[in-house]
Amino acid sequence: MAKELGFFGKITKFIKQVRGELKKVNWPNKKELTSNTLVVILTVIALIIFIGIIDLTLANIITPLIT
């Protein structure tokens, strides 16, 4: 039968498992990280502009109808 772990034994086991999983992670290098960050920033800016245009357009259409 498996040995029952106490509270601290479970924590130790969890930390060892986390460290083992982190060693398996394929971390991006500096070039990949910079490239991906730039893509995210540009995408966010594009979405801000798109949502802003839609908001202004709808506001200009709806405002005359309700006043």
Image (cartoon, rainbow, N blue to C red):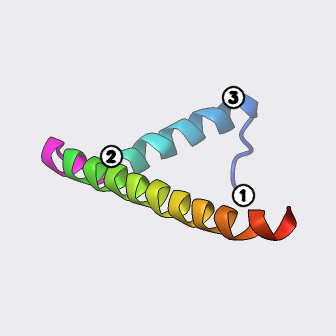
Q: x, y (%) of residue 63?
A: 76, 62
Assess whether residue 24 is covered by the magenta stretch: yes
Asked if residue 64 can be seen in this view, the reply is yes
The crowd level at tag 3 (other Cα within 10 Å; few <14, some 14-19, many 20+) is few
Asked if residue 27 can be seen in this view, the reply is no
Q: x, y (%) of residue 52?
A: 54, 57
CA–CA distance between discs 3 and 1? 20 Å
11 w.r.t. 36: above or below: above
Q: Which residue is mark 3?
A: 8
Assess whether residue 62 is covered by the magenta stretch: no
Q: x, y (%) of residue 62?
A: 75, 68
Picture disc at residue 46: none
Q: x, y (%) of residue 43?
A: 37, 58
Which is in the foreground here, disc 3 or disc 1? 3
SS under mark 1: loop
**Quadrant position of residue 14:** top right
Residue at image position (48%, 54%) is 48
Q: Which residue is mark 1?
A: 1
**Quadrant position of residue 30:** top left
Name which residue type carries label 2: Lys
CA–CA distance between discs 2 and 1? 30 Å
Name which residue type carries label 1: Met
SS under mark 3: helix
1 w.r.t. 33: above or below: below
Residue at image position (53%, 36%) is 15
Left or right of residue 14: residue 4: right
Magenta-tinted stretch: 23-33
Q: Which residue is mark 2?
A: 23
